[in-house]
């Protein structure tokens, strides 16, 4: 339901913009270019992951994933108030505990990036309010480890020996590469002509449920709802040239 509301909101915004253009309303075009640091808060659905980790004694994953990245944009000037740029981000959360002398750990990573396209409302002055989206790709990764005892050069190689089973050391890396589209709404607030603060929100839609394990081995029977779909809050500090 939240996703449907979010999509309908952006359809409404673009309808308003189109209606204004059709009435030939004249506004002063905005211009500029900037780039900077973009930390995000992402709110993925951990429910499927927690079903498995909880069964093996882990605390539940909950709360946002803090991602770190960067990006930038420039007004293309060929179309008034339209800016194009790029973004990249990534972050992780980890749960671990010790049981029967074994250190157990699960790491959850989400990341992505792509092309950004935004339309900035020309009738709002002094700040830039923009609707648009991110088109690109990303990766959802789950790493799991169980270690017992010391690591030695010889011992690590013995883990490959068929006669050394079960091994005291277990590690797996699961990965889902996906395409993404993320509608966004952002507000850029300039401190001056060269420095601005960004705050905004969006929803990341991930497309593709093909998973791999370890060194590219196909992973089957992964639940469909284990994906990177998530609401996110975007912030940022941009340096550039602003004319809002």
Image: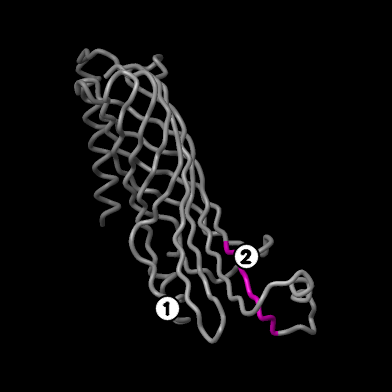
Q: Residue at x 30, y 16 (%)?
A: 243
Q: Residue at x 55, y 76 (%)?
A: 103
- Secondary structure beneath label 1: helix
Q: Count the marks.
A: 2
* Left or right of 113 in this view: 213: right
The answer to if 172 sits in the magenta stretch is yes
* Left or right of 208 in this view: 119: left
Identify the residue under disc 2: 213
Query: Which mark is nearer the camera, 2 or 1?
Result: 1
Q: Residue at x 56, y 69 (%)?
A: 144
Identify the residue under disc 1: 54
Dot 1 crowding, Cα within 10 Å, few <14, some 14–19, many 20+? few
Q: Residue at x 34, y 16 (%)?
A: 31
- Quadrant of image for the N terminus: bottom left
State which tag comes first along the sequence, 2 or 1.
1
Given residues 170 and 110, the one toward you in this image is: 170
Residue 204 locus on image (x, y percent)? 39, 48
Q: In this rendering, is residue 71 above or below 201?
A: above
Given residues 130 and 169, the one toward you in this image is: 169
Residue 92 locus on image (x, y percent)? 46, 57
Residue 108 locus on image (x, y percent)? 48, 62
Which colour style is shown?
Answer: one colour
- Quadrant of image for the C terminus: top left
Contact (Cβ within 8 Å) of mark 2 with mark 1 = no
Hey, which residue is sitting farthest bottom in the picture?
Answer: 100
- CA separation, marks 2 and 1? 21 Å
Dot 2 crowding, Cα within 10 Å, few <14, some 14–19, many 20+? some
Residue 167 locus on image (x, y percent)? 69, 81
Q: In this rendering, is residue 234 above or below 1?
A: above
Q: Quadrant of residue 72?
A: top left
Given residues 119 and 42, the one toward you in this image is: 42
Highlighted range, magenta: 166-174
């Amino acid at each position: 339901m939240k996703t449907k509301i979010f999509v309908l909101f952006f359809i409404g915004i673009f309808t308003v913009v189109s209606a204004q253009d059709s009435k030939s309303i004249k506004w002063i075009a905005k211009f500029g270019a900037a780039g900077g640091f973009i930390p995000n808060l992402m709110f993925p659905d951990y429910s499927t992951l927690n079903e498995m980790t909880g069964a093996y004694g882990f605390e539940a994953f909950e709360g946002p994933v803090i991602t770190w990245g960067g990006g930038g944009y420039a007004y293309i000037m060929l179309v008034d108030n339209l800016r194009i740029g790029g973004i990249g981000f990534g972050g992780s959360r980890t749960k671990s505990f010790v049981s029967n002398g074994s250190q157990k750990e699960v790491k959850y990573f989400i990341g992505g990036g792509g092309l950004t396209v935004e339309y900035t409302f020309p009738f709002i002055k002094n700040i830039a309010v923009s609707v648009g989206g991110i088109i690109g790709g990303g990766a959802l990764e789950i790493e799991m480890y169980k270690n017992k005892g010391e690591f030695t050069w010889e011992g690590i190689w013995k883990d490959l020996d068929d006669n050394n089973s079960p091994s005291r050391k277990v590690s797996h890396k699961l990965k889902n590469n996906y395409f993404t589209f993320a509608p966004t709404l952002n507000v850029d607030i300039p401190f001056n002509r060269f420095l601005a603060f960004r705050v905004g929100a969006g929803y990341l839609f991930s497309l593709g449920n093909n998973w791999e394990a370890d060194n590219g081995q196909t992973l089957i029977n992964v639940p469909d709802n284990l994906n990177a779909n998530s609401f996110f809050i975007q912030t940022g500090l941009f340096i550039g040239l602003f004319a809002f």
